[in-house]
Image (spheres, rainbow, N blue to C red):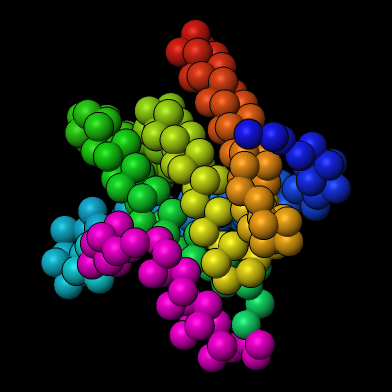
Amino acid sequence: MDIRFDIIVDYMPLFLKGTLLTIGLALAGVTIGLIFGLLIGLGKMSSNPLIRFPFVWYINIFRGTPFLVQILLIHFGVVPLFMTPANPIVSAIIALSLNSAAYIAEIFRAGIQSIDKGQMEAARSLGMSHIQAMKLVILPQAVKRMIPPLGNEFIVLLKETSLAAIIAAPELMYWGRVAGGQYMRVWEPYLTAAAIYLVLTLSLTYLMDYIERRMKTE
């Protein structure tokens, strides 16, 4: 098998441009997902079944259906209701955010429920409201336990951005497909994209391991 390095050289600026968008999509998705995930997680923990019901089913739907189906429905069914033509980058951010929110909600729920109930009771006995106790006592402790799974979710989200290529969002995998189509080659464009994804995910893994070790020593 002969490797044509000229393909890699020709497309490297576009691969790097796509890599920046890939990182941006993942950051946007996980940031918005954190906000919605916290609200959904707290909603699922509600003692009122009527309040809890929609949050439970939101998580069930987004965790129980393929992300590819979600991004296609959002791009071709939802976004056109507000934007014509539908912007693939906007669609990708919305899909990534809604999907990650479902997983992050479960991370928040598990982290909060892992804190001993006596912590809340002690905070309430000191005169704190439920919200104050959650903000000042429970969440700071829970966050330390949530760092590893949140890091894993970010890594998963980074790889899921590759599915945005199906709606023509010009991220890393999109340019791999374009290069493959132009040159009718498979190895060079896809191996290059795979190598970039590997560098990104390994870098994030080492970063999360470092953060986790630092938090354990504090």
Q: Residue at x 58, y 32 (%)?
A: 198
Please report the bounds of the magenta region as a residue range. Answer: 57-85
The answer to which quarter of the image holds residue 147 is top left
Query: Which of 18 and 84 lies nearest the eye of the viewer?
Result: 18
Residue 168 drawn at (x, y percent): 63, 69
Residue drawn at point x = 40 percent, y = 61 percent = 67
**Residue at the far front in the pictured view:** 1
Asked if residue 64 can be seen in this view, the reply is yes
- Horizontal relation, residue 139 to residue 201: left or right: left
> Residue 119: x percent and y percent?
27, 30
The verdict on residue 196 being magenta is no
Task: Give the main secondary structure of the magenta stretch.
Answer: helix
Q: Is residue 200 above or below residue 130?
A: above
Image vertical order of residue 215 relative to residue 115, above or below? above
Which residue is at the front of the view, 54 or 136?
54
The reply to whether the magenta stretch includes residue 70 is: yes
Looking at the image, how many numbered discs can be counted on the residues?
Answer: 0
